[in-house]
Image: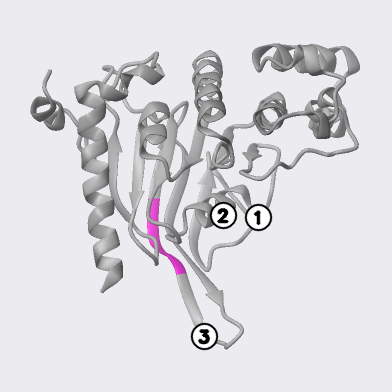
Amino acid sequence: MNVAAALKSVIPLDAAVDAHGRIDTPPRLRIKDVRLEYQMPSGKTVAAIDRISIDVPDNEFAVIVGPSGCGKSSLLYLVAGLAEPTEGDILLGDSVVDGPGADRGMVFQSYTLFPWLTVRENVEFGLKRRKVAPQEREDIVNRYLNETGLAAFHDAYPKQLSGGMMQRVAIARALANDPKILLMDEPFGALDSQTRSSMQKLLLRVWEQHQKTVLFVTHDIDEAILLGDRIYVMTARPGRLKQEIKVPIARPRSLDMVMDPEFIAVKRRILDLLRNEIKDDEH
């Protein structure tokens, strides 16, 4: 398939069947007409997000991209319950999000491990707080240590790990708690390109095994297409949903597909959307 033909295969917003022939499932996450405002020290009110509505289907990997400062991370924090919307609602299943909860796992760009705990102790932290039985806890921790390649480092402390290894621990910790949705805020943004590629491959493999619902924020278009089932493109601030794109690329995926016509077609579409936003933001 050439690039021109691939461009036509980018699935429209209202399609009922995805690129793999799967019927869309009911949303796991529903963001309804959300607005977020900040009060500046001067007293001026600034809108960070304006009337955004997004539905994330169950068991899908959804990615948010947009210009710098458009509110991508702010939206993720709202879903995590770490901030409250000025207007609108966020629902996880049938429940309104009104604060943090164990039904959401969060992986940040910055390293958020407990430095006084070992790798194993970091991964089992949430399980201990939930009073999971010791044997079950050990089984769960061992499973995710193995899946993320951390078994040999189970007794190491964060200061002894590289950035990529610390993010492996953060992912294992989040998954060990079996959240309904995994929220990831540019988790590989601080890593060098080689480590970033390694982490992308790891995340692809782990997601294929568990198929958790994921909401992932990135500024890297290649990363968004490689990982995502659908991509939400936001406008410049105040952030609105400009377009939702279903990624018409079959799974399993690999890093060498970045030169495939379908991949290039989606990338061109997203770059065109973002290029227009940057131009609009300059005037």
Q: For the point 46% across and 43% down, which residue is it?
A: 218
Label 1 crowd (10 A; few <14 / some 14-19 / many >=20): some
**What's the residue at 72%, 28% (across, down)?**
169
Q: Earlier in the sequence, mark 1 or mark 3?
A: 3
Could you tell me residue 92's position as x and y percent?
54, 42
Quarter of the rendering occupied by the C terminus = bottom left
For disc 1, the marked residue is 82
**Whether residue 257 is visible:** yes
> Where residue 91 appears, x then y in whole percent?
52, 47
Viewer-closest of 21 and 89: 21
Element carrying mark 1: loop
The image quadrant that residue 179 belongs to is: top right
Camera-nearest label, 2 or 3? 3
Measure the C-alpha gap from mark 2 to mark 3.
21 Å
Q: How many marks?
A: 3
Q: Tag 2's secondary structure? A: helix
Rendered location of residue 109, percent (x, y): 61, 43
Q: Which colouring convention does the figure follow?
A: one colour
What stretch of residues is rendered in magenta? 48-53
Q: Residue at x 88, y 32 (%)?
A: 117
What is the residue that sits farthest to the bottom in this orientation?
A: 42
Relative to 56, 115 lies left or right:
right
